[in-house]
Amino acid sequence: MRAEPAQTSDNELLKAIARSDESALGSLYDRYRVILFGLLVRILNSREEAEDVLQEVFIQVWRRAAHFDESRGRAFTWLVTVARSRAIDRLRVLAARGRLTEAAKRDEWASVSDADTDAFYAERSEIVRRALQEIPEEQRVTLRLAYFEGLTQSEIAARLGTPLGTVKTRMRAGMVKLRELLGHQVRNLL
Amino acid sequence: MVHQEYKELLSVHALTALDPGDARMLTAHLEHCSECRSAMDQWEETAALLAFDAGAAEPSRHLRERILQAARNAPASSQAGGQTAEATNVIPMPVRRSHGFSMQSWAAIAAVFAFGAFVISLLVLWSQHNASKQELALLSMQVKDAQQQLARQREAIEIVTTPGTQSVELEGTEVAPEAHATVAYDRSGRAVLLANNLPPTPEGQAYQLWFVVSGKLIPGKIFSPDASGHGSVEDQIPAARGSTGFAVTLEPEAGVVAPTGQIYLRSGS
């Protein structure tokens, strides 16, 4: 992976945000808006809902930055976890209201305008997708259903018409395989 | 469940894909097991990699300013751990000064103190006897309360673990930014609210659950948090067309038919 120009670290940005530094919040948003928004659109299938949730995520970052414990993990992991959690919650509320939209077509997404950002995420995206291709399809399917649709093991078993025990085995095996394939690159990817 | 079984659940928990029963057991285990917490952190990093499978997308240009404006209007980040200086409740003993007393004087003084200590001991024992009786009565009441609470928790678990249960998250408002709650409800509308980090209620007041249906607020049940800020209540979602949102306000402990107090928790709807 090509070297990145020196920039303020994520942890330093979070410390600045904890001191109510708006420009730090803006910098963190600029750094991760593309990948986080992409994740939210994938989960919610709606740009409007995804933007609402992205705003909620960064307001939570604004409020909770002082509580981030860098010894427990990376800032990006925290951001992604918060974003996914909020998106899944919103998905459930929308489902309860019967307001889930049709899956957005890929060409309806705004194209990434910044060429550097495109290469930055495209590179990582390519690495992760290549790794996922090495995971058996039945395991990969369970990971994606869980991650992007927020389904539990029982719900996945019901969706696929597969025994629960089989789903449990496949999901665990898929995660173990993903870690084996990418674990040594986590530092570079995240 | 043995420890190895908990470890085998971690990777799936990082995907938040455990069924509710397993998730609850593992969450309780993680509170006490640093080994598993550390392993959990690593599994969450692995799970976060899946975000790159979603692909990239650019939000609208005005969203950045919207977020910064919302941050300006939001309360600033609190200090880590909410640490504030706690008032000490240690009162230093006064320093005794020595006086030029004779041995006989010391003996007389010592005798007086000894007799006084004896009388005080009798009074303390008598007081402790009465306190023990009261404490026993209090403990009996607490056991009864605990049994009732256990029964309520069993009912709540039943609702949450029913297949097809939906859940909605409630966030704390400015008066309780750390508060959070989840409302889980099954197909029949049986609902349970589980709240954390709620401030203690003033005397004579309690939290009240509200159902927000088509813009109208329908009163739900009253509840009070425990000393650690946890609160729960079971209720029945009113039968109505349209989606239901939820809110929690602080009200008189008998409850009200229309909200009068501040909103402490609300759902996104």
Image (tube, coloured by chain):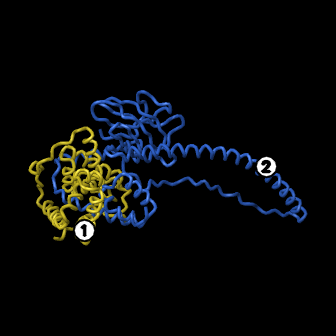
Chain colours: A yellow, B blue
Give the CA distance from mark 1 to mark 2: 72 Å
Residue B180, horizontal then vertical, whole percent: 39, 46
In screen coordinates, is B228 left or right of B125?
left
Which chain is indicated by disc 2? B
| Frontmost residue, B258 versus B32 | B32
Assign a secondary structure to mark 1: helix
Which quadrant holds the N terminus of chain B? bottom left
In screen coordinates, is A186 left or right of B30?
left
Tell me the amino acid under the disc marked 2. Answer: Leu
Which quadrant holds the C terminus of chain B? top left
Residue A159, horizontal then vertical, whole percent: 23, 50
Assign a secondary structure to mark 2: helix
Residue A84 visible to an observer of this rendering:
yes
Q: Residue at x 67, y 47 (%)?
A: B136
Report which quarter residue B219 is drawn in: top left
Q: Residue at x 31, y 54 (%)?
A: A21
Tell me the amino acid under the disc marked 1. Answer: Lys
